[in-house]
Image (cartoon, rainbow, N blue to C red):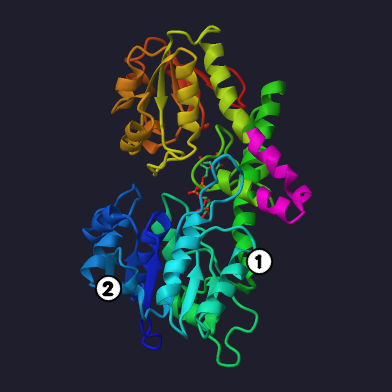
Amino acid sequence: MSERTPPLRISVVGCGYLGAVHAASMAELGHEVVGVDTDAEKVEFLAAGRVPFFEPGFSDLLRRALDSGRLTFTTDIAAATGAAVHFLCVGTPQRRGEYAADLTYVEAATSSLLDVLGPGELLVGKSTVPVGTAARLAERVAERVPGAALAWNPEFLREGYAVQDTLHPDRLVYGVPALSGLDGTVDAEALLDRVYATIVAEGTPKVVTDYATAEMVKTAANSFLATKISFINAMAELCEATGADVKQLADAIGHDDRIGRKFLNAGLGFGGGCLPKDIRAFMARAGELGADQALTFLREVDNINMRRRIRMVELARQVCDGSLLGKRIAVLGAAFKPDSDDIRDSPALNVAAQLQLQGADVRVTDPAAGDNVRKHWGQLDFVASPEEAAENADVVLLLTEWRQYRELDPATFGKVVRTRRVLDGRNALDREAWEAAGWAYRALGRRNA
Ligand code: UGA
């Protein structure tokens, strides 16, 4: 932090994935930060420097921040009193039985923050919310604490890269009130620039806009990413019907830099705690606004995505001579993507469960998600290593492309299975090497050998 930008006192309310990483990152940038969460166990964990989830690099960052004395955690919202900036980082899950987002935590956290917010202070929303939420919360702020202000500053971090994405984001988006900084009101942009001084100084692109645009940037970005994945998976369906090869197709269209190769990996599709629920909440909000037609394509994006899971089960049945009953199946990967222990809406577990329900003897393994699988999917047989999962297997399914699995030696690994058959659900294995080691290789959207 430069000498001209003195550190700020910051509170971060909600210390889940987003909040914990944000709080430690803000301390890393030199600020004095208090993280507040209602979950006493989580607070105790974080305060002791223990990380309640898997995230490369986060443990070191947290430890450094705690050792610096600039980061503390508490369950007591009163500790946020007097902070210049208060970040709202609570979750917005999908409502049970509906597409819409559940704003219970946003409402509750805002209510408790309003008890401590002071004039001249800035409340900053980072959670992913339906467009219109910020304007509504700003009214509550104005009524309760005249002289305070609200800004919306969406977060674009990816699990597995959370530290890097928070400290070096590819853009900053500030949704600020119309007259921000005028007539003695809080200058939200100037205050956020002080928070992110180091990041701004790196020349990070910044978009300063209204609340609605800022909220929509986030849902539009995730919708675009989901659409890109479903686009290539729709092409995979066609490749399966025509004998074409989706990987080569993606490489070829990806060379056009208007299209780009990133997020064109065909396979089992997207899962996790963000993309699926965000596109659904976006559709629900569009419906409320009378603009549902604009987003009907997202329903198809969702459908294509879910169809990949069914197709994977069908492919497994097909290679198991038409019946899954009693077949021993190894599932490599349980997390929704590599470098994460997050199993929310995990395509891998969805497939594993379907196979098991259809009579297969399924063994699942994952380098990081074991505890979560045992806790939430007790009916699945979880084992520690790929070799254990694959012992006497009739077929091996790669469903989350962890490096450890991509780097398996097909010849050695082939010794533990009953039949050398592999289904590459992520198009991530070196096909030639596996085939050379005598494996029958199949993948979604790929030509058969
Ligand atoms: C996503 C966005 O990428 C972040 O920018 C955003 O901040 C975050 O959601 C959020 O809203 O909080 P994340 O859920 O961590 O991040 O995961 P991604 O890396 O986007 O992957 C999502 C899913 O798409 C995974 O299941 C992954 O396996 C799948 N995927 C990704 C594909 O199937 N193909 C691809 O080419 C890329």
The residues bearing labels 2 and 1 have C-alpha atoms spaced at a distance of 33 Å
Quadrant (top left/top right/bottom left/bottom right) for the N terminus: bottom left
Q: Position of residue 400 (x, y in %)?
A: 45, 34
The residue under the point 52% across, 48% down is: 274
Image-quadrant location for residue 76: bottom left
The residue under the point 39% across, 37% down is: 403
Say which of 408 and 105 sits in front.
105
SS class, disc 2? loop
What is the span of residues highlighted in magenta in the rendered image?
283-304
Q: Is mark 2 within 8 Å of ligand 1?
A: no
Disc on res. 423: none
Counting labels gives: 2
Main secondary structure found in the magenta portion? helix
Q: Which residue is mark 2?
A: 70
Q: Position of residue 126 (x, y in %)?
A: 50, 64
Give the amino acid at mark 1: Thr
Q: Which residue is mark 1?
A: 213
Q: Is residue 417 visible?
A: yes
Relative to residue 131, is residue 376 drawn left or right? Answer: left
Say which of 207 and 179 sits in front.
179
Q: Position of residue 134 (x, y in %)?
A: 59, 67
* 34 to 119, vertically: above or below: above
Asked if residue 288 lies in the magenta stretch, the reply is: yes
The residue under the point 34% across, 47% down is: 54
* 10 to 436, vertically: above or below: below
Relative to residue 160, is residue 42 drawn left or right? Answer: left
Relative to residue 433, is residue 72 drawn left or right? Answer: left
